[in-house]
Amino acid sequence: MPAERLIALAAQTLPPVLFRDTPMPTSAKPFLISWTLLSPQSAARMAAHLGWLFRPQVVIVLVATFMVMHATVLQSAIHLVHDAWTIQETVALALLFLFSGLAHELGHIAACRYFRCPHGGIGFGLYFIFPVWYADVTHAWQLRPRQRAVVDLGGVYFQSILLIAIDAVALGSGNPLALKLVWLVTFAMLFTLNPVFKFDGYWLLSDLSGLHNLHQQVSLSVCALIARAMGKQSASRPPLQAAILYAYLVLSGSYFFYIGLFLGHELHSLGAAMSVTPDVYWPSLEPDHHAGWRDVTLVLGHYLGILIWPLMIVFASFFFLNRLRQGVNVIVTGIRAARALPAGGTHG
């Protein structure tokens, strides 16, 4: 019997409290738009011979090699990435970066196959404002926590293996393209380990801590803190879980504050730049009679180029304000719930 049917049957016969915070499998994807590029069968064929890379002795050797080589190369890559990029470099870097994303998702699939866990396909989608690859590893929740953590880290692990090859090219030749790719892939790896959004870092923290629905858990913790501050009763958590949630709350709040400052600065800079140099930003659309409509095409391309970043900033600002509204609602809800609780301290 499929696992989903077993869970549905259990939910009908067992007390609901047993299913509190259980990460139920779902087929819904958290993307605005998405495309499946590799079917489960195709992804399985690609990962069929890669499971040996997760053997502990192999992992130790590869991770140690990566850390030594990457520490040697990364400093040069950080300085070089700020140099001007040619069109050819930009296209090549974009294609190679996309390939590193595919390798990342293949790592998740290969980890599932190593633990003999069913998996889905690999696709590409838009998560809020972020274009991302994704792998369907919904069934990984059936594994033990440490095995789920391996699946969570399988993506950055495969990117680390890819970076060993790129680092070797950069060390051997000093190729600027390789150095810039080192920086881009490293940044992507660090970003996906960020636990604020529901990327790999979020699931890793959830699996290792045993706390599911972290965003909801943090909201409940905020309400509990407000209740205690008002001298009301509130349910307490085990010390380790409470410490993890409060640390997550502080880190998420700091990251959220930084993003707010960044968006405010970018909006101010964009407004100032466009108002000071309108002729540069907004050239005329009137075609030259000698050049025909070629000039109009160039102008439209100019518009597209200058509007991509502002539109992303505006879209991100709306998303930020919506999240800020949700955060305020959590605090207001916590205050209202605390007022309704009886006084007299906390209980277990």
Image (spheres, rainbow, N blue to C red):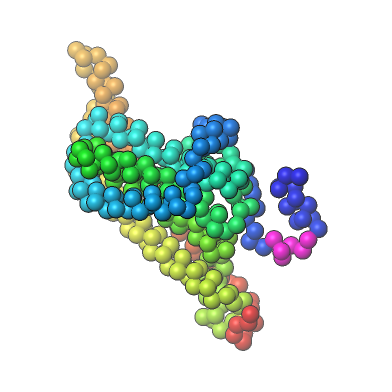
Which residue is at 54% across, 70% downward? 241
Any magenta on residue 205?
no
Q: Nearer the viewer, residue 29 or 137?
A: 137
Residue 59 visible to the viewer: yes
Q: Nearer the viewer, residue 78 or 260?
A: 78
Position above or below: 47 against 201: above
Instruction: Report x, y in % for residue 169.
Output: 26, 39
Left or right for 68, reference 254: left
Which residue is at 37% across, 41% downward? 162
Residue extent of the magenta highlight: 14-19
Quarter of the C terminus within the rendering: bottom right
Position above or below: 294 against 125: above
Q: Quadrant of residue 13?
A: bottom right
Position above or below: 218 against 23: below
Instruction: Report x, y in % for residue 12.
Output: 79, 55
Which residue is at 46% across, 65% downward? 248
Label tally: 0
Left or right for 104, reference 170: right
Quarter of the N terminus within the rendering: top right
Q: Residue furthest right?
A: 13
Any magenta on residue 16?
yes
Q: Quadrant of residue 283?
A: top left
Left or right for 54, reference 10: left
Which residue is at 43% across, 62% downward? 252
Q: Main secondary structure of the magenta part?
A: helix
Left or right for 14, reference 37: right
Q: Residue furthest bottom?
A: 344
Residue 213 visible to the viewer: no
Instruction: Report x, y in % for residue 87.
Output: 24, 30
Instruction: Report x, y in % for residue 107.
Output: 47, 43
Q: Nearer the viewer, residue 264 or 180?
A: 180
